Amino acid sequence: MVDRGLVCGMLLRQRQLGTCDACHIGKQKKKHHRKKIDRETKVPNQMVYIDLLIPSKGNGTRFEAVLVIMDGYSRFVTVHMLTSKSSTVVNRHIKEYVFVGRTASW
């Protein structure tokens, strides 16, 4: 108000106040998160993520492993409960997923 001449009787005019470090930090803006993830996949099943999860022993189920398959384009997740974690069982489920993915009409 003094700088605008709205106050009578005060001698302060056009004072310069330096800003402290806390003021600079307080006025900083956060960077915005990217809303869209840049993916190189353009069609379903172009990139597939596969993970084999093995739970701890004595978990109370008859399953030894869990096969998780995720499509990189649609993020569709398929889960298979496996009674055996042998490579033949895992490969059979992966081949089945690939066969269904090729024959499906998108």
Image: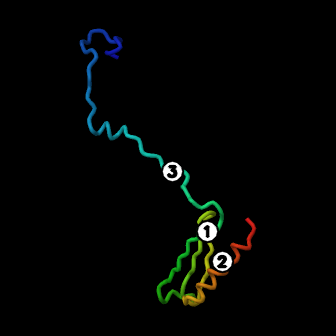
Q: Amino acid at mark 3?
A: Arg
The residue that disc 1 covers is: 71
Task: Tally the numbered discs.
Answer: 3
Image location (x, y in percent) of residue 88: 59, 89
Look at the picture and state if 56 lies above or below 17. below
- Circle nearer the N terminus (1, 2): 1
The residue that disc 2 covers is: 97
Residue 102 sits in which quadrant? bottom right
Depth check, mark 2 against mark 3: the one in front is 2
Disc on res. 39: none
Look at the picture and state if 21 lies above or below 42. above
Q: Amino acid at mark 1?
A: Asp
Which one is in front, 16 or 88?
88
Q: Amino acid at mark 2?
A: Tyr
Measured in 3D between alpha carbons, the distance from the residue under mark 3 to the one under mark 1, in whole angstroms, is 21 Å
Considering the numbered disc 1 on the image, is that residue within a helix, a strand or a loop? strand
Image location (x, y in percent) of residue 33: 48, 50
Disc on res. 34: 3
Image location (x, y in percent) of residue 3: 32, 15
Look at the picture and state if 35 lies above or below 56. above
Residue 4 sits in which quadrant? top left
